[in-house]
Image (spheres, grey):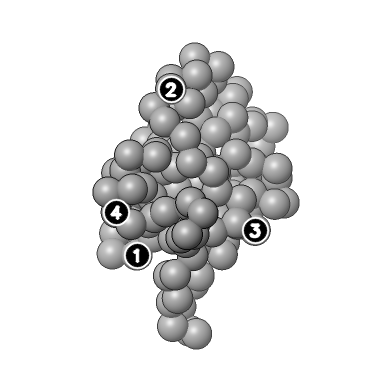
Amino acid sequence: MRYTIVITGPAYGTQQSSCAYQFIHTLLTQTPHTIHTIFFYEDGVYNANDFIRPANDEFNLVQAWQNLASQFNLSLVTCASAALRRGVIQDEKHNNLTDHFQVSGLTALSAAIANSDRVIQF
């Protein structure tokens, strides 16, 4: 099966992103299933903020997303409108979008859903 994952929870403050990460990691390492797209929407775009710095003894979820994307060649997509509203910006003067994330619109989410067998939202 081919999955699209929609994440609406921030990197810290709720369990949504952490649960999504654990689900995706397990899916990719212990099953034959694949991930088509991971789409960060609403407060989920905070997962792409390069300025997030957790304490040394905390799990760095932002870095974990980058590592997962690199290891499994995953597409990490943030909603452009949601990102701008929350200060996650990538332009000529400002850039706090972390590596392996790209900015796109809801059209990308629609296309991902159309090309997936399942969609799961966290």
Q: Which residue is mark 1?
A: 12
Identify the image quadrant of residue 78. Answer: top left
Q: Distance between the Cα atoms at labels 2 and 3?
A: 26 Å
Q: Earlier in the sequence, mark 1 or mark 4?
A: 1
> Is the residue under label 3 in contact with that under label 2 (CB below 8 Å)?
no
Q: Earlier in the sequence, mark 4 or mark 3?
A: 3
User: In what element is the residue under mark 3?
Assistant: helix
Name the mark nearer the viewer: 1 or 4.
Answer: 4
State whether residue 74 is above or below residue 108.
below
Q: Which residue is mark 4?
A: 86
Q: Please report the residue visible at 59 percent of the width from the left and 25 percent of the height from the top.
A: 2
Q: Which residue is mark 2?
A: 107
Q: Earlier in the sequence, mark 2 or mark 4?
A: 4
Q: Distance between the Cα atoms at labels 1 and 4?
A: 15 Å
Residue type, numbered disc 3: Asn
Q: Distance between the Cα atoms at labels 4 and 3?
A: 23 Å
Q: Earlier in the sequence, mark 3 or mark 1?
A: 1
Frontmost residue, 26 versus 36: 36
Residue type, numbered disc 4: Arg
Name the mark nearer the viewer: 4 or 3.
Answer: 4
Residue type, numbered disc 2: Thr
Query: Looking at the rendering, in which quadrant would you find the N terminus?
Result: top right
Name the mark nearer the viewer: 2 or 3.
Answer: 2
Label count reads: 4
Q: Residue furthest bottom?
A: 56
